[in-house]
Amino acid sequence: MEANLILEGFKFMGLGMGTVFIFLIIMIISMSFMSSFINKFFPEAHVSAAAPVKKNNNKIIAAVIGAITQHKQG
Amino acid sequence: MKLFILKLLALFMFFSFTNVLANDNGSANVSLETHKEENYKVKPFSEMITGFLASTGVNAILHPDPDELSSDGKPMSNFHKSWGRVLMILLTFFLFWLAIKKGFEPLLLLPIAFGGLLANIPVAGIAGDHGFLGVIYGMGLSNEMFPIIIFMGVGAMTDFGPLLSNPKTALLGGAAQFGIFGTLVGAVALSQFGFVDFTLQQASAISIIGGADGPTSIFIATKLAPELLGAIAVASYSYMAMVPIIQPPIMKALTSDTERRIKMTTLRHVSRLEKLVFPVMVLTLAIMVLPESTPLIGAFMFGNFLKESGVVERLNDTLQNSLINTVTIFLGLGVGSKLAADQFLVPDTMFIMALGIVAFSVGTASGVIMAKIMNLFPGNKINPLIGSAGVSAVPMAARVSNKVGMEYDRTNMLLMHAMGPNVAGVIGSAVAAGVLISLFQ
């Protein structure tokens, strides 16, 4: 009876660690799958959205510089 | 016409006023005649003084009441009624010192210690069924409500980005759960060799300290072994606070100098949609694999989902701040109610404290060893120092990894890398908790 107790503990350990690892491995696989799926079909929009803002800024800066040089020349 | 109405009104007021006066007189007379004290006997002054002295705390400690029962209605030994309480009150003073002077998890240790102080007051029975600590305990601890709410708040504070950008570090969070099950075997072995008498339920509740996750420990302890709750919660939170002292020697002993200097590749950017899908995905997995773990994982992912949705900023803010703070106060006081002398000053407590530190150390060591094993395989190398962050203790354990890494290379920032195993450790210990609960169903 008493020897069973430690054996019981090891059984708990096997089942517990097994479940934890299986769960995490499934989680890792589905995580990688989910990430590649999302990045392929729903790439984040704000990367492309950020570019025009930058462009606009450049245009404005160019316009300002142009105006200043024109003003200085004139 | 107006005048008439005014006169009428004045007349009416006059009569009603005199009526009230008459009524008052009448009722006062009646009460004077019938006034009787039911619970008070007229006594000479000297007797009043001796009676009052008998009700003082000093007397209760020097001459314990033989009929007094503990908060759960069991008879107590004289030691637990008298000097045991004094000892416990001194112990709570020590906990105050740890929390305030040493900064050991003061947010929880202070409410717990003060709850313990209140629970050890003789006569008042604050931790009893009708005392306010007892009411708090019944309100949210005996039904596992408070740990769940804390989990929601923790979920709202957690960022899964580092884990999503380097998924394989989740394995480190799994390996650290070895601390739980290794300690379980240890606790069971102790009972077998007759040092102490723990049932399997009690051994499981104790070993969950190795998960280094306060709410999970409390959740499991109230479910499997409520009589050990005080000791388990105190062990769990004090060791979590001592993570910066316990972990570094183990981490250094198990790694070589070159390993500690490994630089990890920069984390990729994680899109918002990934972060939004992740909580639902993990919950779905938990539903399929282990429904017993869903109260914890469900609450955790609920908080995280609210945060990542980005449209309920007010709810997210409440979860992260006011709600978790409110519940922390109640949780601390409720746990403190279990620090009553008759429940804490037992030999079991010593073993729980010892097993708790073993659980922490084994968890830390197995996380580090797992990282070394993973480095044997091809692919991006992992700095084994982040393995120790696999025990949950968010974000303390990750900070420790970062700090130890910086000791060897000032430019090596491990913090974000260590957050991956750190949050995976929370999921891992929730799964381990689910397994333990399912075994006793």
Image (cartoon, coloured by chain):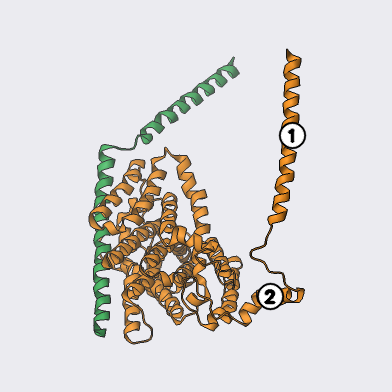
Which chain is depicted orange?
B
Q: Position of residue B318 (x, y in %)?
A: 49, 46
The quarter in which the N terminus of chain B is drawn is: top right
User: Which residue type does callout 2 highlight?
Assistant: Gly
Which chain is depicted green?
A
Give the residue number, with chain letter if any, for mark 1: B17
Q: Could you give the CA–CA distance between mark 1 and mark 2, rounded to whole angstroms? A: 48 Å
Query: Could you tell me which residue is drawn at 23 percent across and 54 percent down?
Result: B288
Query: Sequence-wise, which precedes: disc 1 or disc 2?
Result: 1
Q: Where is residue B307 in the image (x, y as percent from the top left)?
A: 42, 44
Count of numbered badges drawn on the protein: 2
Q: Position of residue B183 (x, y in %)?
A: 35, 75
Q: In this view, does B1 lie to the left or right of B89?
A: right
Query: Could you tell me which residue is drawn at 44 percent across and 55 percent down?
Result: B150
The quarter in which the C terminus of chain B is drawn is: bottom left
The quarter of the displayed image where residue B398 is located:
bottom left
**Mark 2 Cα-neighbour bin, 10 Å: few <14, some 14–19, many ≥20:** few
